Image: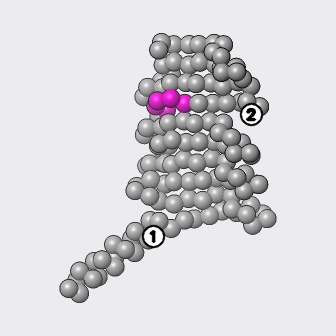
Amino acid sequence: MKTLTVIALLLLSVTALNAQEQHSYFPDGTVKETFWLQDGRTEFITYHTNGRVEERGAFVNGKPDGIWKHFDENGKVLTRVQFTHGLRNGRCLYTNIDGTTQYRLEYAQGKLVHGAELNGSGEVIAERGER
């Protein structure tokens, strides 16, 4: 029974260490970045100086993995990119800062297979690749 208790405590401490967040700060003391380990991934969030989220994503083995999002200072999503083992994969969305143009791109194993440029009304104004 004592051995089981020791093993349980070790597992809990490893889990707690993996869940610990690390922070870096702006000169005024507000949080600039937060990193933590979760299920073999290094998750992160960076912040604008106003405290809103600037970017969110994850790394696996030092490579981008999963969905990454980049936000403007008001919280609007500017970029949404899907990564698989460091390569863009799937649908990605890019919006210029003033919102007048949006790019919808589709990748397969890191290669662009389709792209569309949309105006502020959502109408396609240019296209490339096959659908």
Disc number for residue 17: 1
Left/right placement of residue 31 relative to residue 90 reads: right
* Pick the front one: 108 or 120: 120
Q: Earlier in the sequence, mark 1 or mark 2?
A: 1
| Residue 93 vertical position relative to residue 130 in the rendered view, above or below | below
- Considering the numbered disc 2 on the image, is that residue within a helix, a strand or a loop? loop
Residue at screen point 43% across, 38% down: 84
Left/right placement of residue 64 relative to residue 8 reads: right
Could you classify mark 1 by the number of other residues whose Cα lies within 10 Å: few (under 14), some (14-19), or many (20 or more)? Answer: few
The residues bearing labels 1 and 2 have C-alpha atoms spaced at a distance of: 38 Å
Task: Specify the quadrant that holds the N terminus.
Answer: bottom left
- Residue wearing tag 2: 97
Q: Does residue 90 show up magenta in the picture?
A: yes
Residue at screen point 40% across, 56% down: 39
Could you classify mark 2 by the number of other residues whose Cα lies within 10 Å: few (under 14), some (14-19), or many (20 or more)? Answer: some
Are the residues flagged by discs 1 and 2 in contact, CB closer than 8 Å? no
Given the current orientation, which residue lies at the most extreme bottom position? 2
Q: Which residue range is magenta in the image? A: 88-92
